Image (cartoon, rainbow, N blue to C red):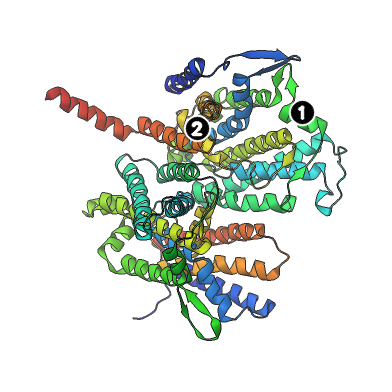
Amino acid sequence: MNLLYPLLALGAILLFNLFFTHGFFHIQIKNGHLFGSLIDILNRGAPVMLLAIGMTVVYATGGVDLSVGAVMAISGALAAQLIRPDYVKGVLEYGAHTPLIIVLIVPLVLSVILGLWNGFLVAFIGVQPIIATLILLTAGRGIAQLITHGQIIVFEHSSFQYIGSGFFFGIPVPIVLVILTFILTWMLTRKTSLGLFIEASGANPLASRFMGIRVKMITTVTYAFSGFCAGLAGLIICADIKAADANNAGLYMELDAIASVIIGGTINGGRFSLAGSIVGALIIQALSTTIMTRGVPPQVVLVFKAVIIIIVALIQSDKLRSKFCQFIQIGAKA
Amino acid sequence: MKFRLNQKNIPLLATFLVFFLIYMSGAVAFDGFLSRRVFINLFVDNAFVGIIAVGMTFVIISGGIDLSVGSLVAFTGVLSANLLSKYEMNPVLVIVICLLCGALLGFSMGCLIQYLNLPPFLVTLVGMFLARGLAYMISLDSVPIRNSLFLDISRLAVRLDRGVKIPSYAILFIVVVVVGAYVLHYTRFGRNVYAIGGNEKSAILMGLPVARTKIMIYTLNSTICALGGLVYSLYTLAGYPLAGTGLELDVIAAVVIGGTLLTGGMGFVEGTLVGVLILGLIQTIISFQGNLSSWWTKIFIGVLISLFILLQKYLSTRKVDACS
């Protein structure tokens, strides 16, 4: 898989900052923790990177998961609700008594179940992935609001907050979680035949089925995995801001994740590149950070993202490339 | 014309049945639910959703999808409100500009989809980003509309007896539905839309103007969507960059509930009308109920689409069985 172009794009953004943003590459160690713009990009990009890892395998099976943002909201809402079970009844006591393991496991299990539901609709019922996951995109936010009763649940839970804003040997914990998930996924897909099966089911489901690959099962598993990644990303954001916001947690993040995957060179129904998606997510985050540090209102970032996605899609379009080649040949003859 | 209950009509019948059931359950549960005002309000409150859903019906029948509609509503609203209040532009000119902007966006998206073979969802996703971002760039705040022509249009209404009136945009909604149904069922363009959705390769081999039709579908949809956006700004008398978030799902839901097949090739504008009314009914019942919150709407919509998709799937697999 060709990582060159995404890396060049990332390099260009960083180079721009080297010249125009003061102290961009300055990394310092405060109290044994790493700080700096670059670390900030990694840290803030962690949720999108996680989503992108899950989205990559879904995209490789020929699908897409639009529900990740909503799953993030659900997972965060559930975690907050578990920490402060009586909040919606008006009991304002901070309940740090809930064991960390429950706060982590229950939302993640629910996220996987939601992913399985998506996978079931896509693989076994045959609904188009966009529609199947679009259902959860809307209904999911409703479910998240149901869990929090439409309120923003604020909480204090020192061990849970650790996964959002803590440091592990000086490295922010979200980054560590991304690295762990990446290595695990990479091992599973590249050191076993699972990755090959995923690519085969995406490229030609019928042929793969005749070859003995359980295409439906593989597809379902990819959605479940995407759900898991989204759940984890939701926990990170929730733990970072110490609150569950059912309306805004992960809003539009599915688009960032899809953009990262496409920038990273994963083909819809075919080969995938986990590293490419990570680079793609970093490009998106670096771009957002750059634009914001330049004092441009953050809303404009959306326009930039749109332009970048379309440029990347154009570069990767075979049809445009062949037309371009024709054009050059005609030019050479003339 | 003889009416036969064939496969094609079952989703449509199911839609009518669901509408009837929900309406009746509302009537049983609440006093005054059957009043004419409640029924007319279905058309009033959902006029912009319905107008956009008509355009989306064309897109989905042709086998495509458009995710940019919600953002385009926001963009149109903010653009019109700003042109009117800040630059005090002629309101007719503003309407023309808004429609042209919609058409331009749709035309570009259609060209990208058709000539570069990019997947519709990706292209329209970009359109969604772009329109929302542009709306934010124009204004971050809600801008009120105080133009006299816009105010007049929004006040314009057909009065029925006992103070019940039908505002102009509810009438526009009905007009768009009727025109949409006519174009889809009785014109060559409409037939081409069905043909492309049924089987694009066959349509090309048959010599139908597939490229032109597809680009026209997206152009048409975005123009209708801009019209919907104008109706929305008439309805709220403001332009707000956050307007229409998640609208694309409501619209797609209305189309799917209305019996249009997501795989393309089959569908009805009439069904879409009933689909919009069903969504409106759910909202009305929730507001009548009083103690249910608005997020239940989203969950109900999700459940309803799931049910309708399962129904469609069941019907289409039966058709395959019958063929083999």
Image position, residue B275 (x, y; %): 50, 66
- Quadrant of the image occupied by residue B140: top right
Image position, residue B196 (x, y; %): 32, 55
Q: Is residue B314 left or right of residue B269?
A: right
Would residue A181 be visible to someone looking at this image? yes
Residue at 35%, 44% (x, y): give it: B113
Badge 1 crowding class, 10 Å Cα cut-off, few under 14, some 14 to 19, many 20 or more, is some
Q: Name the disc covering residue A261, or none.
A: 2
Label 1 – label 2 distance at C-alpha: 28 Å
Q: Which residue is mark 1?
A: A162
Kindly identify the amino acid type of the residue bearing the numbered disc 2: Val
Q: Nearer the viewer, residue B185 or B111?
A: B111
- Assign the C terminus of chain B to one quadrant of the image: bottom left
Callout 1: helix, strand or loop?
helix
Would residue B255 be visible to someone looking at this image? no
Q: Is residue A291 above or below residue B100?
A: above
Image position, residue A96 (x, y; %): 86, 37
- Look at the numbered discs 1 and 2 and tell me whether their residues touch, using CB distance below 8 Å: no
Q: Is residue B4 left or right of residue A247?
A: left
Q: Is residue A188 above or below residue B192?
A: above
- Assign the N terminus of chain B to one quadrant of the image: bottom left
Q: Is residue B77 above or below residue A213?
A: below
